[in-house]
Image (cartoon, helix red, strand yellow):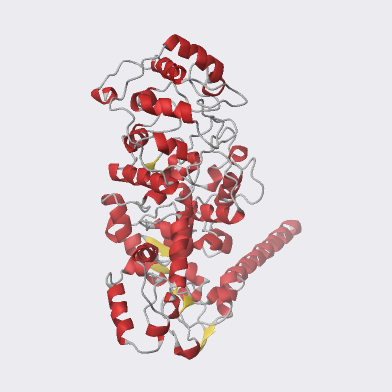
Amino acid sequence: MNKNKHLLLWSSLGVLGLLVVAAVQENVLKPWRTIQAAAGNESGPVDVHLRQVVVPKLRTVDRCVTCHVGMASGEQDVTGPRVVLAHRDVVHDPTEYGCTVCHAGQGRATDKDDAHGDVHFWPRPMIPSRFAYAGCGSCHTHLSVPNQTHLRRGLALIERYDCLACHRLDGRGATLRPAGAGGMEGPDLSRVGAAGYDRDWYARHVQQYERATDGPWRISFGPVDAGDRETMEAFLASRVGAPELVEAKALFHSLGCRGCHKVGGVGGDDGPDLTLMGDRDPARLDFTHVPGERTLANWLAEHFRAPALVVPGSQMPALGLTDEQIHLLVLYTLSLRRGEVPESLWPTDRLRAERLGDREFSVDGATLFGTFCAACHGTSGEGMSYPGMVRFPAVGNPDFLAVATDEFISRSVSHGRPGRRMPAWGTKDGGLRPVEISAIVAHLRQQGGVAAPTAHRAERRWVDGNAAVGGQLYARHCAGCHGVLGEGVEAPALNNQNLLAEASDSYLVETIGRGRRGTPMHGFRDASPVHPALADDDIESLVAFLRTWERQPTHPENER
């Protein structure tokens, strides 16, 4: 009997002790209570209690402000540890939109690991602080972002023309200089791409310059070249308050990533659609070959560094990226996400992209080539060679541009090469528009400095060579690189119906005769250590043999 009494007594005391400990932990020792106890304002210590931001229009309740007190409504004047300080100045008021719409995480939790989503069951952990700008992608689709070269040239021109004497840009500039130059005479330019600016700014600046006799208008301002103004305005259009994210997107538009991947319905089909890649659940990723932390950011970084190692069998080549480039690509990829935001609250840029079809990339030829073509053809059209793949053609090669008409290049881009990695960009879903294809062709011409060739003959098909002789010559001199059946081994496939349909006899004759400087393709009109010189009749016989692979024309375009 006594034993039962003792058992009941001590078990009751144990339960009571556990309840006391639990009560102390919940009401005294919770980390958020300790954090709030260290915060204060002019009136003294802040009231310690649970805080939250309720956003009915987003169906969101965020308790992040329980720790980040200074981000709660009416408490921006709080002082104390860094965690309690007010949010830095951004376009949106955190008290109006909450926190998780931008930063992700588990908004209703109050323990750090739970709130940040660093638990195995939470599919959308908080975006790491070093990639904070990625949160903008939850709502925004930044438009007309140029490639990295254009973007950096725009900034260089802003600096060279001394705009920062009077204007602030992404935290720089507008400081007083000797002789009274500068000092925030003009508006902050950091967000003019979103807010808009006076398109007649240059004419007004010139008027001020002509009226002034001294001061910043005479010291820091002067005439600006029209081409430089266009580049500067393209740069200003990209200033939306997220400079690092725009830089990351510009890099994406320089490496040819859309050649294989779709984003927002635009791009290639060889790789996975990246539109919502930033929303991937880390628990569903394979980290077998990924060292370090099991986060989406780390998985992406290692994948960009060595794609086939992280995803065995991946066809994505290793691009030899620097650590800075990997950081920017991870930032951009994490921004490819979509919050559950009602369409009535969509920002203008997202509406223009998803409802009106506005492009996320600039539509100048250089940016279009970088966005769609650079991964295969090289940033300057020099052609690329990756292990295990047939070398991609050097479309910027002067010898190619000297024999390829603009029509031939346009049709090649538009119709692609069936059976190869080159899609039909002009006809596929998510491809290029006719004006964009024309811009790419013009860019290749301008970059190569080679004018379009004049027609050698009026007719497209004029060769009358001996196909049997041509077959013997092909087997001897061409099959090693182009394949016995023209399938392509170390060089482009010649047994391709689109190529044969679009290439004129003059193009083929001149290509064989000239060759391609800087590539293994030597011109056959001149002897080399690996082949003798071929007479014009022999070259025409080679073309006649290539034509034997061509099927009968099925539509009038092939007969032109």
Residue that appears at 28% across and 77% down: 204
In the rendered image, is residue 274 in sight?
Answer: no
Residue that appears at 45% across and 32% down: 421
Residue 141 point in image, percent of width and height: 37, 56
Q: Quadrant of residue 183?
A: bottom left
Q: Is residue 322 left or right of residue 210?
A: right
Relative height, residue 512 to residue 546 (above, below) = below
Residue that appears at 64% across and 44% down: 290
Quadrant (top left, top right, bottom left, bottom right) of the N terminus: bottom right
Q: Nearer the viewer, residue 388 or 248?
A: 388
Q: Nearer the viewer, residue 146 or 134?
A: 146
Number of numbered discs present? 0
Residue 547 point in image, percent of width and height: 39, 17
Q: Nearer the viewer, residue 380 or 554?
A: 380
Residue 56 point in image, percent of width and height: 33, 64
Most distant residue in the top direction:
468
In the rendered image, is residue 41 in sight?
Answer: yes
